[in-house]
Amino acid sequence: MTNLAIMPILAAAQDVPIELSPADTAWMLASTALVLLMTPALGYFYGGLVRSKNILNTLMMSFASLGVVGVAWALLGYSLAFAPGSSWIGGLDYVFLRGVGLDSGGAGLAIPHLLFMAYQGTFAIITAALISGAVVERMRFGPYLAFITLWSLVVYAPIAHWVWGDGWIAGLADGDGALDFAGGTVVHVNAGIAAVVAAIVVGSRKDYGQRAHLPHDVTYVLLGAALLWFGWFGFNGGSALGATDIAALAFVNTMLAPAATLVVWMLLDTMNTGKITAVGAATAIVVGLVAITPAAGFVGPLSALALGAIAAIPSYYMISYRSRTRLDDSLDVFAAHGVGGASGALLVGVFAAAVWGGREGAVDGNVGMIGTQAIALLGAALYSGIGTFVLLKALSLFTPLRKPSGEEGIGLDVVLHGEEGYAQGEGAVLVQPE
Amino acid sequence: MKMIVAIIRTEKLSDVLEVLYRANVRGLTVTQVQGHGGEIGNVETYRGVTVKMELHEKTRIEIGVSDAFAERTARAIMDSARTGEVGDGKVFVLPVDKVFRIRTGETDEEAVTPPGT
């Protein structure tokens, strides 16, 4: 049984290309497309949760990441994350995709290096888009684009390097590294912390705390959750980096853990409100997916069920608590991704089983694994928080981050994009070209 | 009795409802409408087709009140719906001949909320 994901990728870097595996290549091609779909899916998940006057802006916050972060990743981000470098950041060897070709190259996998770059790019794109849930319905679009582009280079790429490149987190525990199968720390804790900081720096929506801001289309929320789940099979299953037994393990766990989270969440909903809510169910699916992400290829299927079930609890109560605070993390990115990611990152330290994924957690007697996980978690969270704060503050010196409250009232679709998501089509006067 | 018909900005509805509630005004009907006032249309572009939206989304509130409540209801709406920009809307006060409460058969002042105070 080989588990490519637990080997720091660059430690395996070789000068002699490895023979490519058609099976691995086929699975990674499919996985890359699956993960790319998650970003539009996230747009619909978020879009349904906002008011109808901001639907296009919210969708665009995700869709635009496909453009700006996708380009930044190819030109610079991939190199900063995965080129040989220091413990803190990758080097510049792969800038402009230099040396990233069709052979296995520096990635040391049995798939084209170029495909590995694209697969990782889909992760950078969605991680940046995740943050948008904390600043919807008020942030100006230009500064948002500048922010996520820079963030993907300055915050995401180094943390990806720490965990999956030859960074310091990969060097923890005498070089065995912390466990982060598909990005519980790199993607979800990172985005969750960045979201809190962004919500604070950008500020609350103008009526936050006085007026309810209700979801305008819960059917979109469920549709988004469904497409996220589908894409997540590529996110976790693909993180085995080949068509292997571990890919199957990660794939099955990606089905089971959210199932358990959903069951527990529905119970919690019943206990707390007497009703099972659809928005709650969609949220539960995402929380379960987030929680299994760091663990997918390291734990057995029953542990995945347990992990998913346990992870429901902290996120559920964080959402209830957050809405009573003054923190306008509007779509609860922190509760779903920050808390869910942290639950998963710690629980993989508990449930990792040598017989499944080859690494021992606390259930195998390796209690120290939980400590290693906590160090990785805190290191990434600290850097993400500081990096996000400095970036947004610096941007705010050049340009306002949000619209005045009157324009926020009209809605960002008309004000920022000059379009309406649900235009009636009546009363529009054609403006003839000069 | 009077019928108050107010056309307001949609985003001001929550503010207006809250003020009406505080003013003890109960029983109203809200409709989403489109209309055209003095404000300049939003310019929107779809695939190179630029249009000016002459009709704006507005919210219409109808409230049947007793004579004593007409003035304060209208004032409450005005105060809470105002932004100071063109497009804040209008409040119309109309005479009402007769009112029946369907459930009880009460008529006129008895049938509007709040009754006679």
Image (cartoon, rainbow, N blue to C red):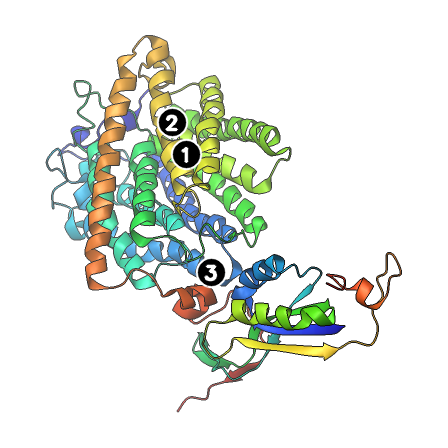
| Label pair 2/1, CB-CB below 8 angstroms | yes
Q: Residue at the spot x=47%, y=67% of the render? A: A410
Circle 3 — which element?
helix
Circle number at residue A290: 1
Location of residue A94 in the rendering, given as x and y in whole percent from the top left corner: 16, 46
Residue underneath mark 3: A54
Query: What's the CA distance linking mark 2 and mark 1?
Result: 7 Å
Q: Residue at the spot x=32%, y=42% of the render? A: A191
Which chain does the numbered disc 2 sit on?
A: A
Badge 2 and badge 3 both on one subunit = yes
Near-viewer residue (A323 or A127): A323
Which chain does the numbered disc 1 sit on?
A: A
**Observer able to see residue A363:** yes
The crowding category of the residue bearing disc 2, from other C-alpha atoms within 10 Å (few below 14, some 14 to 19, many at least 20), is many
From the image, which quarter does the N terminus of chain A lie in?
top left
Q: What residue type is labelled 3?
A: Asn
On the image, which quarter does residue A241 sit in? top left
Q: Does A21 sit above or below residue A153?
A: above
Q: Which amino acid does label 2 sit on?
A: Gly
Which chain does the numbered disc 3 sit on?
A: A
Q: Which numbered disc, 2 or 1, marks the residue that appears first in the sequence?
A: 1
Near-viewer residue (A380 or A11): A380
Location of residue A119 in the rendering, given as x and y in whole percent from the top left corner: 32, 43
In this rendering, would B97 be left or right of A268? Answer: right
Residue underneath mark 2: A344
